[in-house]
Amino acid sequence: MDHHHTANPSHAATPTCWTVVVPGPFFGGFTYHFDLDAGPAPGVRVRVPFGQSERVAVVIEPASAEGEQETRPILEVLDEAPLLDDRTLACLRWAAAYYHHPLGEVVFAALPKALRGERRLEVEALVSTPAGRAALEVGEAKGERQREALSRLVASAGPAPVAKLGPAAVRRRLVEKGWAEPTRMTAPAEWSVPVEPGSEAAPALNAEQQGAVDAIVSAGEGFRAWLLHGVTGSGKTEVYLALIERELAAGRQVLVVVPEISLTPQLIDRFARRLSVRPAVLHSGLADGERLAAWRAVAAGTAGLVIGTRSAAFVPLARPGLIVVDEEHDAALKQQEGFLYHARDVLVWRARQLAIPILLGSATPSLESLRHAWDGRYGHLRLTERASGATMPAIHCLDVRGQTMVAGLSPALLRAIERHLLAGGQVMLYLNRRGYAPSLVCHACGFVAGCPHCDAFLTWHRQIGRLRCHHCGFEQGVPADCPSCQAPLSVRGMGTEQLEDVLAARFPGFGIVRLDRDATAGKGVMADSLARIARGEARLVVGTQMLVKGHDFPGVTLVGVVNADQALFASDFRGPERFAQSLLQVAGRAGRAERPGEVLVQTHDPEHPVLRRLLSEDYEAVMAAQLVEREQAELPPTRFAGLIRADAPQADAARGFLAGIADQLRERFGDELAVWGPVPAPLARRAGRYRFQLLLLAQVRSTLHRALWAVDDSVGSRRLGGRLRWSIDVDPIDL
Ligand code: ADP
Ligand code: ZN
């Protein structure tokens, strides 16, 4: 490298310094110098010496050389133009600070995988020479293919990628004749748009839909967050479509984020049928090359509409107009490993930064968003009826106390299943399994084991056969008899597989499909299962959380909720909220077509206030009551929460580490900060490591962040001696 060459001799003595980041557990950036004239810029990748080796880094900002020890040089600039624009970089810096995560990790997570290494975006290209342009003018190029290649090259008024210039032999001739010269260029970020207009006409919006569209349109440009609370089947997607159409027509981009990959195909189809665009798709199921092409087209502004899962929250937008987050309540919008961000919250921040509206849609909005809407911070739009004219299904409770159960199904539910099958309907059985630590419920009287010290239910830890309080750490063995009615207690596990077997034996010939993470793990299995349900080949559907996710099953007339109590009596304070959401979502799968739907909920506590309010279909009333409870218990969203997790091969190491932090924080912050724990994590032992957690709750957001920074400062690295690991989760959703 030539260290003496510089464009500006007066600054020859002071090389320009740059802060760069690399992936890894480093909280700060690293300073390097660069003293060639074609310097790097924020957002480009560079190759730098790092320790004994070399790394790919991303440039963040110019740095001052003052006070720096001798800096090492940037070895090579890998991109001609920044991959991340200033606004995206600012968003990533905010996200790293807010979520207390290393900036390098955040920045590299935002890049498509294909760009996390040294891969260059350059391609081989040709550029026309004056002789070439003259040759074209006088018609010197003889062969048709030569003439075509040459005219295309001249028309591009600069270099053109060889891929666009015909076969290699033709291109070689152009160079041999002196009409073109080989060069290299950044591959253009192209995105083909179908010439065909959308094949499907929009339905006339009903009054509520039109009202929602009008409200957003008349608020004009600029930042505004809107909550679109529309019951299942109320036509939220039509509202999105109407707004998307407007934005695209105005030449602005729309980013639509959904919680699940499995929801993207139906949305893409629907958008493609209705709009004359090819949506760019961003999710982890794509090949690296496909994802790269889509990402670049969005960043360059050549793709107008982008649909993606949570990681799309960080895609650069060249001409942003609108952001839509569908199923905004869904926990899948929160990343649960590594960089623990919530895509919805990041997008609200981004919409404000980009000064554009954001629309959060759900049939069962999160308490966080509802509270903003009730307080007037978000515009509140309601769709209260199904757009197709279908009625909402009726929800009833089945009291299962003392009933003889078959694989967790009560006689009443079994009779209902039979009735619906014989009447030609489809039946869906929902088993609440994932995400909840189970509680201990007496089948005879409905007694639930609670903590003697807290207003909380105890969690049954299967592996160790004990009950535990997740708030204070209280622990006891599983009693043999119910403390309330003295009936013998038996704790049984129940799974979708067992349910499937029993149903297949009991209702042979009706076809059965199981939808859970295990059953749909293989490629294409999910789509296949959904198709079998759609064709009516499978009349019985058994599944977990997966059933809840926005799929449309028009033939389903009965939904059975097998174990409501798991969620109602969960130790997680969000249990009732989650239950209300999944119940209404799964209920929303029933009766989408002509036949009215029925929903039966099995419970040991039919008088539970959450259930009773849900039966009357008043989701907002359920959530308003939840908010009062949260306020009283000083929990989110009325408090700002941060969770510190630690795990180690020895329980004492993890617990002791968190206990030390807890003492330090209690002393320093006093009443400003509530510190709960350390307690064992819901999954207390995983892969031979003991897991503990410490919950921090503050009335003021900045207090929480000051506390977390204090922890970062005093602990330093995230990897400590004794193989202890720890992490910070801001706004945790699983406790
Ligand atoms: P959501 O997104 O709220 O679940 P959808 O937008 O999928 O609801 O609409 C549910 C069904 O109602 C779809 O079949 C859709 O085509 C239909 N639909 C939506 N809006 C209208 C309307 N204004 N007129 C007639 N049908 C509509
Ligand atoms: Zn307790």
Image (tube, rainbow, N blue to C red):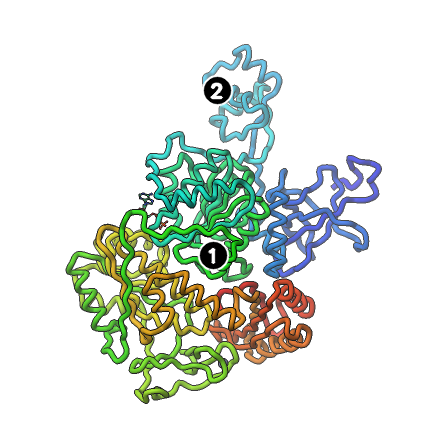
The residue depicted at 52 percent of the width and 20 percent of the height is 150
Q: Position of residue 220 (x, y in %)?
A: 52, 40
Name the foreground residue: 367 vs 258: 367
Asked if residue 256 shows in the view, the reply is yes
Say what amino acid the circle numbered 2 marks. Glu
Q: Secondary structure at mark 2?
A: helix
- For mark 1, what is the residue? 333
Asked if residue 290 shows in the view, the reply is no
Spot the residue most to the left: 422
Q: Position of residue 339 (x, y in %)?
A: 55, 59
Q: Are marks 1 and 2 in contact (CB under 8 Å)?
A: no
The residue depicted at 61 percent of the width and 61 percent of the height is 100
Q: Note whether 403 is above or below 590 in the view shown.
A: below
Q: CA distance from mark 1 to mark 2?
A: 49 Å
First in residue order: circle 1 vs circle 2: 2
Question: Crowdedness of circle 1 by 10 Å Cα count: few (<14), some, many (20+)?
Answer: many
Q: Note whether 243 is above or below 703 in the view shown.
A: above
Name the foreground residue: 621 vs 554: 621
Q: Secondary structure at mark 1?
A: helix
Q: Position of residue 317 (x, y in %)?
A: 55, 42
Q: Which mark is residue 148?
A: 2
The residue depicted at 35 percent of the width and 60 percent of the height is 584
